[in-house]
Amino acid sequence: MTDYMVFVVLGALAVLILTELVAATLPVLIVIATVPPEEREGLAKLLAACDSSRRLRLWPALRLAVRARRAEARRARRAATPDVPT
């Protein structure tokens, strides 16, 4: 009976560790796979500015980065279009 409990506890511990590893690496892998290489440095700087804690909270920082990128694109579009008098 004791051997069975040890295996159950070790199995639960292994599942917990694997879940934490996947939760820590999956967002980073998604960013690496979806962000073009020429934009990664800018994104890294923006993420560092958005979240300077020891443990990076990637999703909130990415949301802020997306907002900043959309605002930058909006400003660039406004600057590129000539003013049309109404």
Image (spheres, rainbow, N blue to C red):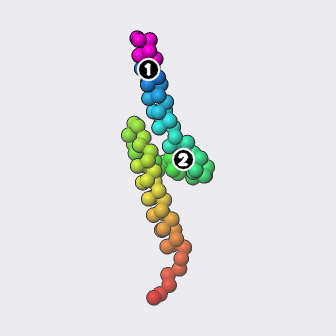
Give the image location of residue 77, x and y in percent. Answer: 52, 71
In percent of width and height, residue 20 lies at 45, 33
Which range is magenta?
A: 1-8
Left or right: residue 34 compared with residue 20: right
Check disc 1 and report the residue beneath it: 8
Image height of 36 relative to 18, above or below: below
**Vertical comparison of 68 with 59: above or below:** below
Q: Are marks 2 and 1 in contact (CB under 8 Å)?
A: no
Q: Position of residue 41 (x, y in %)?
A: 55, 48
Label total for image: 2
Query: Which residue does the image show at 47% across and 22% down from the upper left?
Result: 11
Q: Mark 2 is on which residue type?
A: Val
Name the residue rendered at 52%, 51% in the picture: 42
Residue drawn at x 44%, y 11% as measured from the top left? 3
Q: Is residue 81 visible?
A: yes
Mark 2: few/some/many CA within 10 Å (<14, 14-19, 20+):
some
What's under tag 1, amino acid-wise? Val
Say above or below: 75 vs 36. below
Residue placed most toward the observer, 74 or 28: 28
Q: Which residue position is annotated with label 2?
A: 31
The N terminus lies in which quarter of the figure? top left
Q: Secondary structure at mark 2?
A: helix
Query: Is residue 7 inside the magenta stretch?
Result: yes
